[in-house]
Image: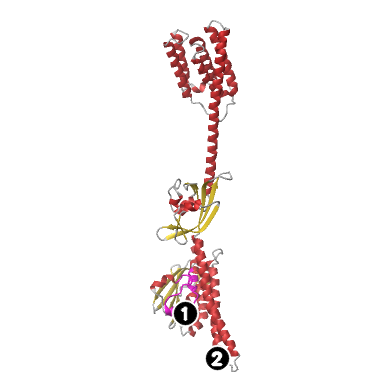
Amino acid sequence: MAQSNVRSASSPEINPRIIVAAIVGISLLLIFNFLTNQTFSTNPYLVYGTALFLSLFAGAHLLPSVRPHVSKAASIYAYHWILCFVLIFIVPTLSYFLYIWVLLIYLTYFSYQAKGVVYSSIALWAALVMGVQYQDNGLTIASFNKIVPQYILLLIVSIILTQLVFSNVQKRTDMESKVDQVERERARLLGLINTMYDPVITTDGRGYILAYNAAALNLLDTHMTLTGKHIRSILKLKDSKGNTIDIFKELESTTNIQRRKDLVLPVGSTDQISLDLSISTIKGTSLFSKKEGYTLLLRDITKEKSLDEEKDMFISEVSHELRTPITIAEGELSMGMLLVDKPKLAVEDIKESVTKAHDQVVFLADMVNDLTALSRAERSDTKMEIQTFKVGDIIKEIEQLYTAQAAKKGLYLKIAIDPAVDKISTNKLYFKEIMQNFVTNAIKYTQQGGITVTINKKGNNIIVAVKDTGNGIAKSEQAKVYDKFWRSEDPLTRSTNGTGLGLFITAKLARHIHGELGLESELKKGSTFTLTVPINLEKDESD
């Protein structure tokens, strides 16, 4: 039998220890038969020698020094010759030793498939014929009739057992291949899920977690494994009204896809995360398949919710602030129109109405300017222009712009610049707007006395301080002065018109130029706002 390479690549290797154990067992059985007078040969040397040779030949295959030099084909040849010898000269040919040939047929089929079975079957027929002829002193019709059924039965048993074994092996191999494929697909799926920015969790039909990604762990702020845990124990959600949500019931109620944006995940005792939750069912390929599991896609929309709420508040506040001056201006202009139509023209009354309307229009213009500045301050997608300019030039512009406005209220506006302060490199527009906001805010909330602006140099920074003699700000309110639309609850301050955007814009602009704001204030004694800004912003940014 020539060695063939047609053995199925999916067939497993046979453990040589099993073969050796089987052959040693056969050797011991051969000796037992001799001791109980069941062998054909009565020569102890022949029987014991054959059993010993068979055991040693089989055992040699386990030796690392021998195994590489003995081919599989040579081993199978040897086992066939040895079994032929045993069946012809040692044991009765038609004894149960004949069924050991089933093992040989299996081995040849394992290595050479159908061709190996043909060769092994021919060798079996030869062993039967020669054995019966030798032991019965000739081949008769009676003995021939004995060996044919035995031969046919052996072939049938061998083929059936071999097919059963290899069929099971093939099924197991196919199953292992499918399992490997599923594992690879699962690994690819998990790899894909882990690349997703949004948290993903998948569960089985009973709600137990099968897979998740790193973003889910970040959302839940945990490092423990989630696999095998029930979704109820992981996602303890509430709705926007504070009612507890049974997440598994939400899964069960999902027919195909469900989305909810009103859920929150409590974090700690006071904080919570707003969630956008999408649930989709996992079904089999059949149209009528039951739900096999669920996929949950979660998205943290806390910031979006906050922005939406802030936008709603912004629109509400701006609408309210716009409504008042528009109403007043409209009323005063209507009054002026009525006065013009009177037979006796009341110039002073008309002038008073127009002046009041003009003041409200100026207020509206200031609000529009504030909103424009706010839009500019909140834009982070444009590169900020850095300019080098003299601080004194900006201060002179501020002095020229607001001295008359201060004098109109009977206030003084004093400027004091340290001679050491010369040029500064920063955004000129932002610096000027901060100064204007400080000064206009001081003038607005000061009724007597005045405003003093001082500029000093300290190290690589300049410090701008705007001090007023106004009503001051209570300690409890000082932390809120830079909030959007904030207005003091103090009656003296509250009576002054304002949008509540000036200092909020100032804080935004200060952050853009790496400035730090400060505030010192005392009720009925005034306030001092300070800005500390780097002299050279370009150097700061490059550092």
The secondary element bearing badge 1 is classed as: loop
Q: Is residue 207 above or below residue 317?
A: above
Can you give x and y, in whole percent of width and height, for residue 386 in the image? Answer: 54, 67
Q: Is residue 536 magenta?
A: no
Q: Which residue is mark 2?
A: 348
Question: Would you call the spot at circle 2 few (<14 residues within 10 Å), some (14-19), or many (20 or more)?
Answer: few
Q: In front here: 66 or 360? A: 360
Q: Is residue 506 magenta?
A: yes
Q: In front here: 214 or 392? A: 214
Q: Is residue 42 left or right of residue 10?
A: left
Identity, as a three-letter code, of the amino acid under mark 2: Glu
Q: Quadrant of residue 382?
A: bottom right
Can you give x and y, in whole percent of width and height, for residue 236 in the image? Answer: 44, 54
Identity, as a three-letter code, of the amino acid under mark 1: Thr
Question: Would you call the spot at circle 1 few (<14 residues within 10 Å), some (14-19), or many (20 or more)?
Answer: few
Q: Is residue 131 above or below residue 2?
A: above
The residue under the point 58% across, 20% down is 117
Q: Which residue is mark 1?
A: 496
The secondary element bearing badge 2 is classed as: helix
**Dominant secondary structure of the magenta stretch?**
loop
In the orientation shown, which residue stands out farthest toward the front? 288
